[in-house]
Amino acid sequence: MTRPLLSSAAAVALVALPAAAPALTADEVWASWQERAAGAGVALTAGSEAKSGGTLTLSGLALAADIDDVEDVTITATMSEVSMVEDGAGGVEVMLPPSIPVTIAGSDEEGADGSALITIALSGMSLLLSDADGGGVTNTYAADGITISLDELTEGGEVNTDVVFAISAETLAGRFSSTGGDQPLIESSYNLDSLGLEIAATDPDEGGTFEMTLDMADLASDTTGSFDVADLVAMSPDTTLRDMLDDGFSVDGTGGVGATNYAISAEGMPESFTSSGSISGISGEVVMNAERLLYDLAYNDLEFAASGSEIPFPKVGGALGQLAVKIGIPTTLEPGDMALGLALRDLTVGEEIWALVDPAGQLPRDPASVALDLSGTMKFLIDVFAMDGEDAPEDLPAEVTALDINELLLTVGGAVLEGSGAFTFDWSAPGPFGPGTPAPDGALSLSLTGAMGLMQTLEEIQLLPPQQAMMGRMALGAIAVPGDGPDTLVSEITVSPDGTILANGSELPF
């Protein structure tokens, strides 16, 4: 169901956010709608057209699209009346109906027919098309509210009344600008006060129930790029990222979401469970162009709780200060900047989890963190962007020539490991660690506090055998020296191009 819904939204977007000729008239906007819909494989027709002065009225507007990768599935949408009004200042105001019915119809693998009737309801919707700087069209839009709701679900000729699906959005304002041309320059931004999702279903055979709610606040996005919306909708499954980049595709977008809450519950499915959680905010950035690809996403202040028939506790819960992922790579075969980051900061779990390993409470309940932030220079040896998923190699065919360790962090049980460093790699020289390896050169600085105390506590609660604890202390003594504070160890690890590895100026004993 997800892909048809997304395709339906994309098809309606072709109408809501069109591109038109620089000299805007209602007739030109309508012609542009039809042209771009046809280019995306969407049939867009009007039962009748009437022009009076600067107003074009389209009655019985119908939109139909087949889903290419879902067999025998068709999406149709109808609009009772759409008016395009020339405002006398070079713009065209589009009046959409307050309700747009959408039908998704198809058959399953066994040939049984099914359909979903959906209503898109618009409250206080406005859409104004005007000339954009440098040619093209700017679309300015706003709405007091938008809801998408499932009215009826039919399976095998029978109506299923036990499914609820609804999406609601409040106070939307945005702007979309396209310069026109084969690869339009796009500028888009929007702000949305709130977005909600509600799903509920009952199993007609077993009687089990499932419910889910999701509430998000303060959604915002700001994007610039070079791409054609219609081309993206009509893109062939064989199109690769390299094809898109060679055609001039680029995107640079930032966005975020404010406070988010969710709740999920199931009864008699046959298991029963409940889960709930919240996030204070989400922020992200995506960049893709002919030089680089960057994906940077962070979730902040996560809290979660769960209970269920398969969970051996009345309730489990925890919190996470931040979950962040960052990936940056070049999109060419030339050397370029790289970035790699992963962070799970300030993880805490409920006492019911701690009680499994430390019922007496001897271990510190300090939050645990894992963070790694890398940057540097690399190059691909083959064009991975020209491959599809089936052709992708198991090993990454790339050479890293410089690597900066900006942050290395591990905290658990009161112990803290921190590190930073920098290395270069010469692939033209014979590698000291075997064929196909580069000659490394660099150093890593490490600091460890609280490790001895943690090992002692682990011994006392019998989670760490004395022999293994002794071996750990000996290993630390071989590569580290005492630091300035209590229970603090430091180490400077250097690696030379000939393969020599030193710890605080001395060769490692192993």
Image (tube, rainbow, N blue to C red):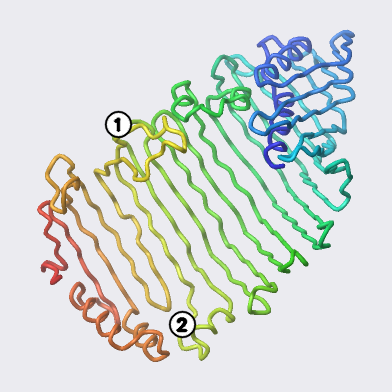
Please state the horizontal and vertical placement of residue 242, each as a whole percent of the image.
Answer: 44, 27
Mark 2 packing: few (<14 Cα in 10 Å), some, or many (20+)? few
Disc 2 on helix, strand or loop? loop
Horizontally, is 337 left or right of 283 in the view? left
Please state the horizontal and vertical placement of residue 215, each as a whole percent of the image.
Answer: 72, 54
Horizontally, is 274 left or right of 440 in the view? right
Mark 1 packing: few (<14 Cα in 10 Å), some, or many (20+)? few
Amino acid identity at mark 2: Pro
Question: On the image, which quarter does residue 509 sit in?
Answer: bottom left
Along the line of sight, the residue nearer the viewer: 198 or 416 = 198
| Residue beneath the point at 85% across and 19% down | 83
Please state the horizontal and vertical placement of residue 32, each as a whole percent of the image.
Answer: 71, 14
The image's mark for residue 334 is 1
Disc 1 on helix, strand or loop? loop
Quarter of the picture containing the N terminus is top right
Horizontally, is 376 left or right of 74 in the view? left
User: Pointer 2: what residue?
Assistant: 364
In primary-sequence order, the first of circles 1 and 2 is 1
Q: CA distance from mark 1 to mark 2?
A: 49 Å
Q: Is residue 319 above or below residue 186?
A: below
Please state the horizontal and vertical placement of residue 110, each as a whole percent of the image.
Answer: 74, 40
The image's mark for residue 457 is none
| Residue beneath the point at 88% across and 15% down | 47
Mark 1 or mark 2: which is in front?
1
